[in-house]
Amino acid sequence: MLFAVLGWSQVRSFFPVTQRWAFFDHAAVAPLSKPAQEALIEYACDLAEHGDVHYRQWTERVEQVRQLTARLLNAGSPQEVAFVKNTSEGIGLIAEGIRWRAGDNVVIPQEEYPANVYPWLNLAERGVEVRFVPTVNRRIRIEDVAARIDRRTRVLSVSWVEFSSGFRNDLMAMGKLCRDQGCLFFVDAIQGLGVFPLDVRTTPIDFLAADGHKWLLAPEGAGILWVRPEVLQELRPVGVGWNSVINAEDFSTIDFRLKPHTGRYESGSLNMAGVHALGASIELLLKIGIENIAKRVLGLTDRLCQGLRELGWDVYSSRHPEEASGIVSVEVRGADVRELVRHCRAHGIVVNQRAGRLRISPHCYNTEEELDRLTELLGQAPKA
């Protein structure tokens, strides 16, 4: 394993962003890892110099990335994974594919990212209700989720990690609730995948989508969709194109037999460069070890939260071990949060803001010294 050989100081060398910035905004658009950067350059050079001469090699690499993604999820087969443009596309394909009946409902947390809201609200003309679960004491309580589910609930859809608060949902508990209630379980995994281990064979999830441009340290526009094989046939096929069928490359024959796996959602040409770069980053993260990354990120955020509390600031994010994540959301009394973000940027530190709170999201390659520098800077920041 790469981490056992190199340690964190050497892992850091895989991230060029560290030469200029202390970057704590992985919950937005993360910097590329060096392997992802190199994969993009290699593909661009090959395409510029050779056209499609090496197209077969490109497609073989896509299948290798599919295998890497299946390893990341511990999926039963690489064919359970499809590459999509982004999380929104993945959610939309499933939302549109479920065979709805008027009077059905979907349950989602109240403070979800819009990608996990609008595709479900768009079903209103089919008579589908969206039910929101309120946040209580900065948490999404399983009993409140259960209270919103009834016999007409078809889907519970949640983010693994909530984008604003950083609350990490208990996927096992929520999945079990869905199994007990007879509804499907969708997970927007974009804020957790690459940081926390996930086993889709043992966790009762039915669908999962994530883009690569956050914690997976890959480009925008290259995401993944995973569908449990047992539920695939329950879905109405949508987004069908030339690449959705079994003999996709026999262009002269029309043979409308859909691929019997999630690959049917790859309707046409893929973002080849993006998928190659996504694979390079996933390969790096797997070599470091997702368990190692989780421990490192939680250790860094614990240290950060301690420093922020010493400044007298209110850490909004839950720090319970089962609920904490790489996102630290902070209530900053007496300060203009947007001005704080600009102040940090001017001093070489990248943070962000959401919902009127400062949001800080370090990754495994960040250091304790960088966090201490951030805390010191925030302590000196001008008040509103």
Image (cartoon, grey):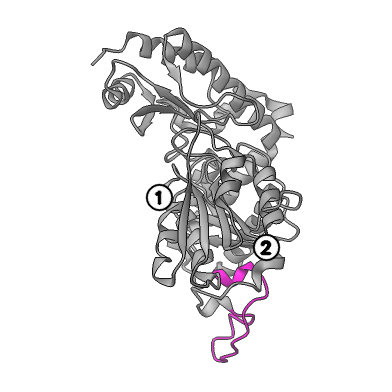
Q: Position of residue 324 (x, y in %)?
A: 58, 29
Mark 2 neighbour class, 10 Å CA radius: few under 14, some 14 to 19, many 20 or more = many
Observer-nearest of 93 and 278: 93
Observer-nearest of 96 and 242: 96
Dividing the picture into quadrants, the one containing residue 208 is: bottom right
Quadrant location of the N terminus in the rendered image: top right
Lateral position of residue 352 relative to residue 254, left or right:
left
**Foreground tag (1 vs 2):** 1
Q: Which secondary structure, mark 2? A: helix
Question: Majority secondary structure of the magenta segment?
Answer: loop
Lateral position of residue 93 relative to residue 183, left or right:
left
Does residue 61 appear anywhere in the picture? no
Above or below 51: residue 208: above
Return the mark for residue 184: none
Above or below 29: residue 272: below
Return the mark for residue 80: 2
Residue furthest toward the left? 384
Query: Pointer 1: what residue?
Result: 114
Q: Amino acid at mark 2?
A: Glu
The residue shown at (36%, 34%) is 355
Q: Amino acid at mark 1?
A: Pro
Above or below 56: residue 205: above
Quadrant location of the C terminus in the rendered image: top left
The residue shown at (53%, 33%) is 139
Magenta segment: 245-266
Q: Position of residue 235 (x, y in %)?
A: 59, 72
